[in-house]
């Protein structure tokens, strides 16, 4: 049983911390939200009054925070000054690659081992403990972290050095955002041509149009009963979060000199959808905007 500090108990962090507590780890948790913190305590965590207090005496620190600026601030002000050398640091936030590498360098200089380990799988995966972790960091840090990550996820991939976990995450989600728009456009075209949605699904899901956005997360009601389309686009992964990842991908593409025209267009379309007041809906709900609703 390890002493784990968990900072950031939102929609994803809360269930992840709960799974660590369920696995009999001693989890000391902190979040700015009292409600989120109280829920974590109900799930077996111990309450800390601050991030700095949470990490004192911890063997492992796990963070799940909104953006790069928050990760930098928490590690610089709260984590690194208050943990012992040799503490394993795991940042599961989805942030820009530069911030991930900056914080990892600070950790290395302070004698800590650190990985960036953003996740895929949404709230359902966080709750079920079936997340995919994309990990960046040194081999030794990855080896130490793997047993902890396995209590929260099903698929753990070492993507290379520091920042490469973030790189893998944003590249993957750019594919997801673009493919969801393509699938949505196809269903809206089929609708206007008088082709039944189930018939299109039956064809595309068994031929060259097959992709995850179609077969696992079909954006129209009916063909895939478990998709958010069948529950009024209640979010598994919000449109606002998709927009965040697409913006991160564009920032990275611009910095690296990579050409990503479809990624750029996807970011523009999700920006329109989110700024129309639909940021809290599932990202597959963009089909409604493409349908003119």
Image: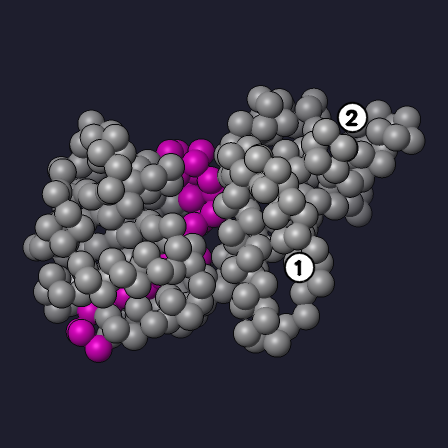
Q: Nearer the viewer, residue 20 or 248?
A: 248
* Mark number displayed over residue 198: 2
* Mark number displayed over residue 50: none
Label 1 vs 2, first from the N-terminus = 2
Q: Nearer the viewer, residue 126 or 236?
A: 236
Mark 2: few, some, or many residues within 10 Å (few <14, many ≥20)?
some
- Compared with residue 41, is residue 140 higher up or lower down, i.e. above or below? below
Q: Inspect the magenta stretch and tell me whether residue 112 lies in it.
A: yes
Q: Position of residue 247 (x, y in %)?
A: 55, 57
Q: Is residue 139 left or right of residue 154?
A: left
Q: Position of residue 16 (x, y in %)?
A: 32, 41
Which residue occupies the extreme front position in the image?
276
Q: Quadrant of residue 260?
A: bottom right
Q: Residue at x 50, y 45 (%)?
A: 241
Q: CA distance from mark 1 to mark 2?
A: 30 Å
Mark 1: few, some, or many residues within 10 Å (few <14, many ≥20)?
some
**Disc 1 designates what residue?**
264
- Is label 2 in a helix, a strand or a loop? helix
């Amino acid at each position: 049983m390890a002493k784990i500090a968990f900072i950031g108990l939102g929609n994803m962090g809360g269930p992840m911390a709960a799974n660590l507590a369920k696995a009999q780890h001693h989890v000391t948790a902190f979040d700015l939200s009292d409600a989120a913190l109280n829920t974590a305590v109900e799930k077996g965590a111990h309450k800390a009054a601050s991030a700095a207090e949470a990490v004192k005496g911890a063997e492992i620190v796990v963070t799940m925070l909104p953006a790069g600026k928050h990760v930098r601030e928490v590690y610089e002000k709260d984590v690194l000054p208050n943990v012992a050398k040799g503490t394993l640091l795991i940042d599961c936030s989805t942030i820009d690659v530069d911030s991930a590498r900056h914080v990892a360098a600070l950790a290395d200089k302070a004698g800590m081992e650190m990985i960036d380990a953003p996740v895929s799988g949404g709230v359902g995966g966080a709750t079920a403990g079936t997340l995919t972790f994309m990990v960046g960091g040194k081999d030794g840090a990855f080896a130490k972290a793997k047993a902890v990550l396995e209590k929260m996820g099903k698929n753990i991939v070492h993507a290379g050095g520091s920042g490469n976990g973030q790189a893998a995450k944003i590249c993957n989600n750019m594919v997801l955002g673009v493919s969801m728009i393509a699938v949505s456009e196809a269903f809206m075209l089929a609708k206007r041509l008088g082709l039944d949605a189930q018939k299109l699904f039956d064809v595309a899901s068994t031929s060259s149009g097959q992709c995850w956005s179609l077969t696992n997360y079909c954006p129209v009601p009916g063909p895939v009963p478990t998709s958010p389309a069948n529950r009024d686009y209640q979010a598994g992964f919000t449109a606002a979060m998709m927009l965040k990842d697409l913006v991160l991908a564009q920032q990275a593409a611009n910095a690296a000199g990579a050409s990503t025209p479809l990624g750029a267009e996807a970011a523009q379309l999700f920006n329109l959808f989110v700024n129309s007041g639909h940021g809290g809906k599932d990202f597959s709900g963009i089909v409604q905007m493409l349908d003119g609703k």
